[in-house]
Image: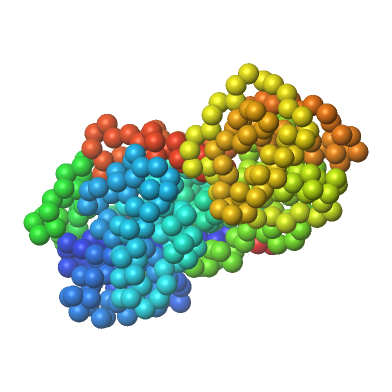
Amino acid sequence: MGRVFVCFWFDVEDYVTPRSDDAVMRLAQIFSSLGETATFKVVGEKARRLRERERRDVIRAVAEHDIGYHTNYHSVHPTPSEYLVDLGWEEGIAEFDRREHGGLTDVEDVFGKRCSTYGQPGGSWAPHVYPVLRQWGVPTYVDEGQHIGLNDQPFWYGGVLTVYRMRSRCTRMKLGGGENLRAGCGEFDRIAEELADTGGGLISIYYHPCEWSTTKFWDSVNFAAGQNTPLDALKLPPLKAQSEADRDFADFEEYLSHIARSGVQLVSCAALPELYPDTWNTAPLGTEALVSLAGGMADAVSYQQTPQGWASAAETLGVLANAGAHLHRTGMLPDVSEGVYVEGPASRPPATTAAGCATREAVLEACTRLSDAVSVDSRLPHEVRIGEASVSPAAFARAVAQVVAAEAKGVHTRSIDIEDVPLTCEDEVIEEGAFRWLFPAGFSAPVLMEHARLQSWTLKPAVLRK
Ligand SMILES: [Zn+2]
């Protein structure tokens, strides 16, 4: 039986309805009274309003828990996917930092602790967020949506531990009384059992405290489908009757107690990095592992398993290029290789034109240039020059892999085939249905999703610590 972990997270975002402040506090108190920890992902404007409304009681109750960040203004347009929609990679990274860093600082100041995670408003996801989280020192991305995922379990993307598109491993009891409590507990038990039977893993459960205070979402009445009510004219969503709210709190407490007693372990987002360490570069890779990585690049490029953990496609290419550079310099493959983090390219590579050949020397020279470039900015270039030709990083990966594999057998291949291979991990990036109710009808983000596919070079499974 595998171990099952459950992460409860709350998006604390309704800065319109003062009564929702009490709902946040009551939920924090429910977890505290059971000795459990939840994660509260707070919007910058919500944190500021709690401070202005002098809700020190709410702030104290929530600060006993784990704190995350949920953007500065949440649904105010343009939201992150909207303002990043057509931006280049560098430009988008700078723009997300410029617009959102202040809110992070406010949330951390108000609650007196560092944020353990970030998640986007609605479906307003973007790949540019990930390098910024690394800069900010926010170790996880936890939310639910369609844009990217891997096997309904945590994964690494952009160098950040991510819980997203959990689908079959994301559940919640519906609020509203009646049979919901029994149905919610039943569904939880079924998922936990399935997960335990298949090696264990994580279940993601999320709510919004405002679901206990209003019958419609605060932002659906102000910001749905692209509408943009000014901050000083925000409409109040209809309040939930107190008796109904009380019933929903009572049901939730029962639901949580049921889960806490069911043999699983509740964890906050802050506990996830320790639970899912990135282990592939904790020890040097030997020649056998190097050759195995090279063999995996023959027909397609994707993440791969090494003896000590998963390497992303970019990390694999980084290691192979370093080995090629070593071979170029010394005439021998390295005995051991060090793994380093490598980001995907900032723009679409050229299509590698008609299959051709290159000399071993030209491939090794290219390895030296790529290895030097990656050691400076930890990023794959969007094209690699081999002799006179410009090829995609995927075609280059395949070429280096051929040299390394042959060299390990003592063969000096004279001529290397240059041919494009698919980056199969980019198939995990899906736009269809991902940008929904918050967005104006017909919103689509081809440039943004192209960056998402380019960064799938960094995608790989996250594995539970033994
Ligand atoms: Zn939200």
The quadrant of the image that shows the C terminus is bottom right
Q: In the drawing, does residue 310 fall left or right of residue 117?
A: right
Q: In the drawing, does residue 358 fall left or right of residue 448?
A: right
Residue 233 picture location, percent across and down: 8, 56
| Residue drawn at (73%, 35%) of the image | 363
- The answer to whether one can see residue 167 in this image is no
| Residue drawn at (65%, 50%) of the image | 372
Q: Nearer the viewer, residue 171 or 449?
A: 449
The quadrant of the image that shows the N terminus is bottom right
Q: Nearer the viewer, residue 276 or 93?
A: 93
In the rendered image, the vertical position of residue 278 relative to residue 125, given as above or below: below
Q: Nearer the viewer, residue 173 or 440?
A: 440
| Residue drawn at (27%, 76%) of the image | 58
Q: In the drawing, does residue 88 fall left or right of residue 153?
A: left
Residue 183 picture location, percent across and down: 40, 51
Residue 325 picture location, percent across and down: 74, 46
In the rendered image, the vertical position of residue 86 relative to residue 92, given as above or below: above
